[in-house]
Amino acid sequence: IYPNPATDVINVGFDNPQISSLTISIFNLSGQKLKTISSHGNIGQSIQIDISDLSKGLYYLKLISEKSNITSKPFFVR
């Protein structure tokens, strides 16, 4: 996830650019789901997410693809 800290957008990079279906959810540190983004088709090496509606604070992502489920390290929105 970059940049970290972020203000308006974050970029999520992938080791496996062959992912064809991906769901990304953004959570606050209390575990409340704030946003979900789904992407289908050729995702490529990264995806950009608009976070301009998030308040200042720490958040984390859960990424679910056809091959894995990943929870990110926290990122900071300023």
Image (cartoon, rainbow, N blue to C red):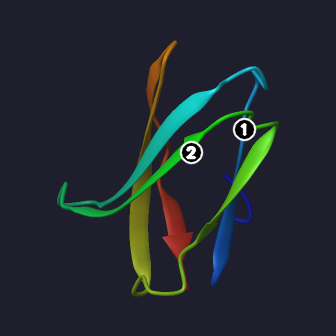
Q: Is residue 56 above or below residue 75?
A: below
Disc 1 marks a residue whose amino acid type is Ile
Disc 2 marks a residue whose amino acid type is Ser
Residue 70 pos. (x, y %) = 46, 28
Q: In the image, which disc is placed on residue 39?
A: 2
Q: Of residues 27 and 56, which is closer to you in this image? A: 27
Q: In terms of secondary structure, where does tag 1 sit?
A: loop
Quadrant in which residue 16 is drawn: top right
Q: Residue at x 46, y 46 (%)?
A: 24
Q: Is residue 58 above or below residue 1?
A: below
Residue 6 shows up from this direction: no
Residue 60 pos. (x, y %) = 42, 53
Give left or right: position of 36 versus 13.
left
Residue 23 shows up from this direction: yes
Residue 51 pos. (x, y %) = 53, 76
Q: Of residues 5 and 14, which is closer to you in this image? A: 14
Give left or right: position of 36 versus 30.
right
Q: In terms of secondary structure, where does tag 2 sit?
A: strand
Q: In the image, which disc is placed on residue 52?
A: none
Q: Residue at x 71, y 51 (%)?
A: 47
Contact between labelled residues 2 and 1, with CB atoms less than 8 Å apart: yes
Give left or right: position of 47 versus 77.
right
Question: Which quarter of the rendering shows the C terminus?
Answer: bottom right
Quadrant in which residue 44 is drawn: top right
State the residue position of label 1: 43
Residue 39 pos. (x, y %) = 56, 45
- How much space separates mark 1 and mark 2, taking CA atoms? 7 Å
